[in-house]
Amino acid sequence: MVTMGVIMSDQSVSTRYSVQVGAFRTEAAANSVANPLVYLGYPVRVIQQDGLYFVLVGDYPLLSEATEAEQDLNLLGYETLIKEFEQKELPNL
C-alpha cells in the first residue's frame, strides 16, 4: 500500500525462529529436557499448545541464526526442528 509517497507494509509483525528440541505430553518431561539446556546457558522456554508441551530454544530474527543454534544442539545429541513464528505469537523469553 502506498500512502503519501511512503511505502507501507500490510504486515505489521515480523517472523522469528526458534529451535524445537522436543514435544511432550507432560510438563515434567518437557522440563527434564529444558533444564539441562538452561544450565548450559541456552534461552529456553516451555510452551503448552494443543495438549503438548514444546521445548523451544532461542528467539532468532534470522533463519541463519536459528540454523546455527540447531547445529550446536544437534552436536549435543538433540533432535531438532526449526519453528517459524510471527513475533506476536512467540512468548517472551
Image (cartoon, rainbow, N blue to C red):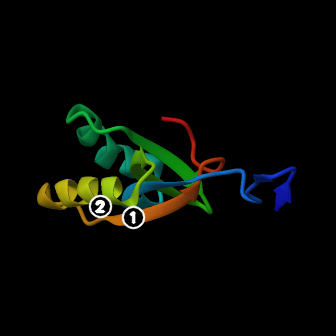
Figure quadrant of the N terminus: bottom right
Q: Which residue is mark 2?
A: 67
Q: Quadrant of residue 85?
A: bottom right
Residue 78 in percent (x, y) is at 22, 60
Is disc 1 surrounded by few (<14), some (14 to 19) or many (20+) residues within 10 Å? some
Most extreme residue toward the left is 75
Question: Which residue is more in the foreground, 13 or 4?
Answer: 4
Question: Which residue is more in the foreground, 47 or 60?
Answer: 60
Q: Amino acid at mark 2?
A: Thr
Residue 53 in percent (x, y) is at 49, 54
In the image, residue 40 above or below residue 79 = above
Q: Which residue is mark 1?
A: 82
Is disc 2 surrounded by few (<14), some (14 to 19) or many (20+) residues within 10 Å? some
Contact, CB < 8 Å: mark 2 with mark 1?
A: yes
Q: Residue at x 24, y 56 (%)?
A: 68
Q: Quadrant of residue 15?
A: bottom right
Residue 20 in percent (x, y) is at 39, 59
